[in-house]
Amino acid sequence: MLTAVEAIIEKNGKVRLQKPIHLSSPCRAIVTILDEKSKFISETALLSEAALSDWNRPEEEEAWSHLQKVQ
């Protein structure tokens, strides 16, 4: 089972959980550092990036070029 737990990581690397958790045994964990500068990036945009990458091809650019504004 995957469980997400919010935490703060201090400059010295100490991890401070925001809420207490109770585990029956030691567990492995993955820590993701959230860059404060990128906190306004939509999670939906990040999660859909791979699905939409197929649109980033020259054929797609040509097919949709008639909808682009003339500069």
Image (cartoon, rainbow, N blue to C red):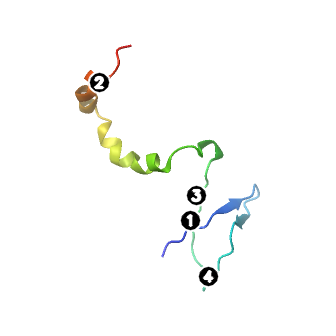
- Residue labelled with disc 1: 30
Q: What amino acid type should be assigned to the residue bearing mark 1?
A: Ile
Q: What distance separates the C-alpha of mark 3 from that of mark 4?
A: 20 Å
- Secondary element type, mark 4: loop
Would you name the residue on which mark 2 appears? Answer: 67
Taking 45 as reference, is 55 left or right? left
- Give the residue at mark 3: 32
Marks 1 & 2, CB-CB < 8 Å contact: no
Residue that numbered label 4 is attached to: 23
Point out the tag, 1 or 4, that comes first from the N-terminus.
4
Tell me if mark 2 has few (under 14), some (14-19) or many (20+) residues whose alpha carbon lies within 10 angstroms of its own: few
Q: Earlier in the sequence, mark 3 or mark 2?
A: 3
Please tell me which residue is depicted at 61% across the width and 80% down the height of the picture: 26
Which of 68 and 2 lies nearest the eye of the viewer?
68
Q: Are marks 1 and 3 in contact (CB under 8 Å)?
A: yes
**Residue 67 or 47: which is nearer the viewer?**
67
Q: Is residue 5 above or below residue 40?
A: below
The amino acid type, in three-letter code, at marker 4 is Leu
Could you tell me which residue is drawn at 57 percent across and 43 percent down? Answer: 40
Q: Label 2's element? A: helix
Viewer-nearest of labels 1 and 4?
4
Q: Quadrant of residue 3?
A: bottom right
Question: Between tags 3 and 2, which lies in front?
Answer: 2
State whether residue 9 is above or below residue 36: below
Marks 1 and 2: which is nearer the front? 2
Q: CA distance from mark 1 to mark 3?
A: 7 Å
